[in-house]
Amino acid sequence: MKLIHPMREGRVLSLVLTLAALGACAPRLQDPGPAAYTGFAEPRIEADAFITRDAMRLGLSQWQADEPRAVLIALHGMNDYGNAFALPGPWWAARGITTYAFDQRGHGRSPQRGIWPGSEVMVQDLGDFIAAVRRTHPEVPAFVLGHSMGGAVVLSALSEGRAEVDGAILVAPAVWGWSTIPFPLNLMLWASAHTVPMLTVTGESLDRWPTDNIELLRQMGSDPHMIFETRFDALYGVVSLMDRAYEGSPDMPPPVLLLYGEQDQIIPPRPVGDVIARMCPHRRVAIYPDGYHLLLRDLQAEVVWRDIVTFIEDPRAPLPSSGETRAHEAHSCANEDE
């Protein structure tokens, strides 16, 4: 038998102990708000904050219509915040739609920035916020809109019967979960989140463009509320959320409008196409040939804003753009293919 030199044996033992210590790490989740220990309260909306059931104070943006014909609850994407709707919000308000957008936990002006809150509490926050909006506007139809990660939260809430709304809009929904990403990437992310969860990564080396609106990218790049370095455990969390949304998508109630850009370089078309096919026959879909991931802030964004207003006014009305015809040609229902 070959013997191991004592010094080399010590190095091997040190490596084993180091790997064991790293393996003991786990993805971190946010601490709950103070009321989680003292008794939950009824969530409420303030001028610049959404107070959750556990008394967490989340940042809030709102654009009020003078006489609202509908209210829109808007959820932003990963590392973004309520300001994501600063362009369409006033435009919708001028057309009778009041928009509320709260900063989801760990994002924007909300506490514990950069720390993943967990998909369950995100879905719970959405349901609570919808209920609070309905109490504020008891006689007005309420719609929910989710962009990217926000779309995954909306998808999860809808499929689980936890979003009592009159309709939903999914803008480039994040559905690139564990069951749809390549296995090597899957394995690498799991290992990173369970060994070095606190390390951060940026998307600079990927050379992907979220929008064709360069001026917007400059503004976002200097916005102190944006997050530019993402922890591995936050990435692990958002992929788990996307998987939850992807698996739950067939059970969504109508009416639902899904919007996607053919130039989207963030969310691949295949999982989105899977969701579109499985949402039949209740879904409506619009595909924008010139649209990027930030559909609501692209150079052609007003086309998308107008489609959303039309859907809110009448979920069955034809959309002003030609995107719906293109979507029908590209994505037929599963039962239509049989």
Image: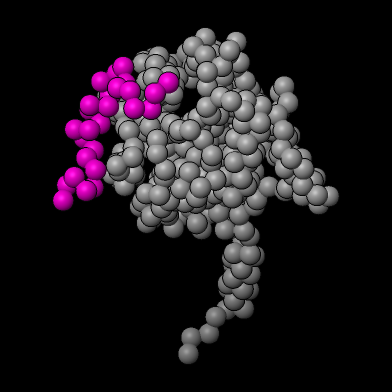
* Coordinates of residue 260 in the picture (x, y in percent): 35, 30
Between 291 and 97, the one nearer to me in the picture: 97
Give the residue displayed 71% in from the left and 37% down from the top.
43
Q: Is residue 96 above or below residue 167?
A: above
Q: Give the number of callouts.
A: 0
Give the residue displayed 30% in from the left and 43% down from the top.
280
* Coordinates of residue 284 in the picture (x, y in percent): 32, 33
* Coordinates of residue 47 in the picture (x, y in percent): 72, 22
Magenta stretch, residue numbers = 313-338
Q: Is residue 41 above or below residue 218?
A: below
> Quadrant location of residue 333?
top left
Q: Is residue 142 above or below residue 200?
A: above
The answer to whether 29 appears left or right of 99 in the picture is right
Whether residue 11 is visible here, answered yes or no, is no
Whether residue 143 is visible here, answered yes or no, is yes
The answer to whether 28 appears left or right of 311 in the picture is right
- Which residue lies most toward the right here? 38
Task: Indicate yes or no whether the magenta region holds residue 328.
Answer: yes
- Which residue lies most toward the front here? 139
Q: Is residue 225 above or below residue 202?
A: above
* Coordinates of residue 338 in the picture (x, y in percent): 16, 51
Give the residue displayed 80% in from the left and 45% down from the top.
34
Give the residue displayed 50% in from the left and 30% down from the top.
143
Between 93 and 3, the one nearer to me in the picture: 93
Task: Indicate yes or no whether the magenta region holds residue 183.
Answer: no
> Quadrant location of residue 310?
top left
